[in-house]
Image (cartoon, grey):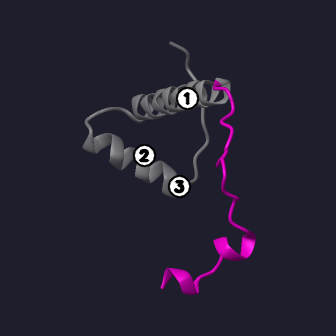
Amino acid sequence: MKNVTITLDEATALWARIHAAEQNISVSRLVGEMLAQRMRDLSEYDHAMRTWLARPPVKLSRSGTRYPGRQELHDRARLR
């Protein structure tokens, strides 16, 4: 375990103390768990993004028909 010193504004420090007390843990542990969760979330997101980008591109093709024009796509009256 490493010790780290952080600086918080009064409102954030008060929130952290209250939130930690509600969970019956220390502020240090609260911050550590929050950072660990953030690290996991980012790791999962990065993995998902790499997996998505590794997929081959999808060719959009509509054999025998043309793609709709800009006006057709943005015609709001048709949606009402």
- Label 1 and label 2: CA atoms lie apart by 31 Å
- Label 1 or label 3, whichever lies nearer to me, is 1
The 10 Å Cα crowd at callout 1, few under 14, some 14 to 19, many 20 or more, is few
Q: Earlier in the sequence, mark 1 or mark 2?
A: 2
Which of 54/44 is in front?
54
- The residue labelled by disc 1 is 48
- The residue labelled by disc 3 is 10
- Label 1 and label 3: CA atoms lie apart by 37 Å
Work out which residue is located at the far top of the displayed protein and give it: 1
Q: Which mark is residue 16?
A: 2
Which of 39/56 is in front?
56
Q: Amino acid at mark 3?
A: Glu
Q: For the point 25% across and 35% down, which residue is it?
A: 24
Q: Position of residue 43 (x, y in %)?
A: 56, 25
Relative height, residue 47 to residue 7 (above, below): above
Q: Is residue 74 magenta?
A: yes
The 10 Å Cα crowd at callout 2, few under 14, some 14 to 19, many 20 or more, is some
- Label 3 and label 2: CA atoms lie apart by 10 Å
Query: SS for tag 2?
Result: helix
Left or right of residue 7, residue 40 in this image: left
Work out which residue is located at the far front of the displayed protein and give it: 64
Q: For the point 55% across and 20% down, which residue is it?
A: 3
Q: For the point 55% across and 15% down, which residue is it?
A: 2
Corner quadrant of residue 27: top left
Q: Position of residue 53 (x, y in %)?
A: 67, 29
Point out the stretch of residues depicted in magenta.
55-80
Q: For the point 43% across and 52% down, which residue is it?
A: 14
Helix, strand or loop: magenta stretch: loop
Query: SS for tag 3?
Result: helix
- Asked if the residues shown at circle 1 and circle 2 are in contact, with their CB atoms under 8 angstroms apart, the answer is no
